[in-house]
Image (cartoon, rainbow, N blue to C red):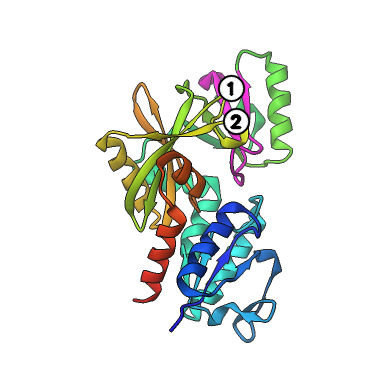
Amino acid sequence: MTKKIAVIGIPGKWSTEVLADALEERTGFRLVLDMADVHADLESNTMWAGDVNLCELDGLAVKKISQVYSPNTLDRIELLRLAENAGVRVFSRAETIIRMIDRLSCTVTLRNGGIPMPKTCICEDPQVALQIVKDYGEAVFKPLYSTKARGMCIISADNDEADILKEIEAFKADNQVMYIQQKLDLPGRDYGMVFLGGEYLGTYARVSQSDSWNTTINSGGKYALHEPPQSTIDLASKAQQLFSMDFTTVDVADTDDGPIVFEVSAFGGFKGAKEGIGIDAAALYADYILGEVAK
């Protein structure tokens, strides 16, 4: 019997559509949906996209839950638990994704798991933040809900104290809880280490092509193949095991003191895997999904 797997993502976006293409090629069924168009009826325990009851499908592959992360994103993920309760396999499981959307939740899980990360402080008091900047010398202020370095800023201790406080207050205006990380002197590249079902597939580098402080593709970075030592693979494997994602990438960078982990992605990147490593992650993921729902 044909399995019906819907893809939750951003209709028209490359990564969403290539996963839908791969699943359609294997099953003949195609449904791409935006969670903004989904409504749930808690009385009947149903969840609808148009006239399709998602609780009657075999699986839901979550490629993107929203274009921009916010606390509202968590509510969208909560709805997926309705489908799971009805026996629908969600990739990755809703409880797992929820723990990763909030940057602080992800960081605490990694630190509790003994994963090396940049020095990080969390506070709400601007005066405490000021002292953190002084201690770090240069600090990256990161929103708790963001992707691809959106909303991040660097504050340097070289500035006048009054100017530092102004920058902190400007960040705090949109971020009551301030996530502050020491800015590291990295060699113009970091790595996305790809895992499927907990198995390591390969690593791509994001290489800076400008004087931007980050290497994201949004800031002009380019993908390239990278072959890390086994010790770094083991570290990334340990990090992703803390979350049990079906498909993910672990963001890693080299430092003078050894590799560190920035985060484990809630969804992982297909484009980096394709352009950097040369693997069709969407096809591999589709095969994995169908294998899981057949169990």
How many numbered discs sit on the rendered protein? 2
- Amino acid under label 2? Gly
Under circle 2, the secondary element is loop
Q: Residue at x 43, y 59 (%)?
A: 283
- Residue at 58% x, 64% y is 8
Q: Secondary structure at mark 1?
A: loop
Q: Is residue 76 above or below residue 227?
A: below
Q: Amino acid at mark 1?
A: Ser
Quadrant in the picture for the C terminus: bottom left
**Vertical relation: 171 (above or below) 139:** below
Local crowd at mark 1 within 10 Å, few (<14), some, or many (≥20)? Answer: few
Residue 198 on image: x %, y %: 33, 55
* Residue 247 located left or right of residue 164: left
The x, y position of residue 29, in whole percent, is 54, 75
Instruction: Magenta stretch: give its range.
Output: 133-156
User: Residue tagged by mark 2?
Assistant: 220
Residue 88 placement (x, y as % from top left)? 48, 76
Q: Which mark is residue 210?
A: 1
